[in-house]
């Protein structure tokens, strides 16, 4: 089993969107029995809250349902429970790096490192941005999700 955790600040925009997109891709590829997903935020502001309505609507337009997801906060144990902890930006990467137990730092990655063709390092937070920000974030997340799945197939599932 490969366990993947997507992480942003509040766990209501980027990380639940990434979880939903990746979960849908994994299901369509017939790998949902061997790859599990979750999402979390480095802050505790939205514990128990559903994803932002704009994120849910943008995902729904692409056939992805986020309605079952609820916000939670990251914890040190996540580094034991997940093989991949994927930060949406440098700020969350730094927060996760401080939380990582010694010897588990190798599980932490920038999510967009799996989409080098984008020439970007961070998924921008669409919360305060323009209306199309959620669509742009979805485009980035879809590209990184495909790259992540290819990586998992080549490294984790090939064993």
Image: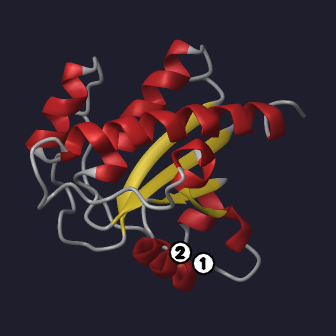
On screen, residue 103 above or below 88: below
At x 19%, y 32%, the residue is 58
Element under disc 1: loop
Could you say where residue 49 lies in the image, as x and y percent from the top left? 15, 53
Residue 90 is labelled as none
Residue 100 is labelled as 1
- For the residue pair 22 and 91, the one nearer the viewer reads as 91
* Quadrant (top left/top right/bottom left/bottom right) for the C terminus: top right
Residue 76 is labelled as 2
Please tell me in which quadrant of the rendered image residue 29 appears.
top right
At x 36%, y 51%, the residue is 15
Could you say where residue 96 lies in the image, as x and y percent from the top left? 51, 75
Question: Mark 1 or 2, which is nearer the eye?
Answer: 1
- For the residue pair 140 and 156, the one nearer the viewer reads as 140
Measured in 3D between alpha carbons, the distance from the residue under mark 1 to the one under mark 2, in whole angstroms, is: 6 Å
Element under disc 2: loop
The answer to whether any part of residue 82 appears in the image is no
At x 46%, y 30%, the residue is 23
At x 45%, y 80%, the residue is 95
Could you say where residue 109 lies in the image, as x and y percent from the top left? 61, 62
Lower position in the chain sequence, tag 1 or tag 2: 2
- For the residue pair 80 and 12, the one nearer the viewer reads as 12
* Quadrant (top left/top right/bottom left/bottom right) for the N terminus: top right
- Assess whether mark 2 and mark 1 are in contact (beta carbons under 8 angstroms): yes
On screen, residue 107 above or below 102: above
Could you say where residue 107 lies in the image, as x and y percent from the top left? 67, 62
């Amino acid at each position: 089993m490969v366990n993947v955790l997507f992480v942003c600040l509040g766990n209501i925009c980027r990380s639940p969107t990434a979880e939903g997109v990746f979960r849908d891709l994994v299901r369509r590829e017939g790998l949902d029995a061997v790859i599990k997903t979750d999402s979390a935020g480095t802050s505790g502001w939205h514990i128990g809250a559903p994803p932002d309505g704009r994120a849910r609507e943008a995902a729904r337009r692409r056939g992805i349902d986020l309605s079952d997801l609820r916000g939670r906060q990251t914890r040190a144990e996540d580094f034991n429970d997940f093989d991949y902890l994927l930060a949406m930006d440098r700020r969350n990467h730094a927060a996760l790096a401080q939380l990582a137990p010694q010897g588990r730092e190798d599980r932490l990655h920038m999510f967009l490192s799996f989409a080098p063709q984008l020439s970007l390092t961070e998924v921008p937070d669409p919360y305060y941005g323009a209306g199309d920000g959620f669509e742009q974030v979805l485009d980035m997340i879809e590209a990184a999700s495909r790259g992540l799945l290819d990586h998992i197939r080549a490294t984790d599932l090939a064993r």
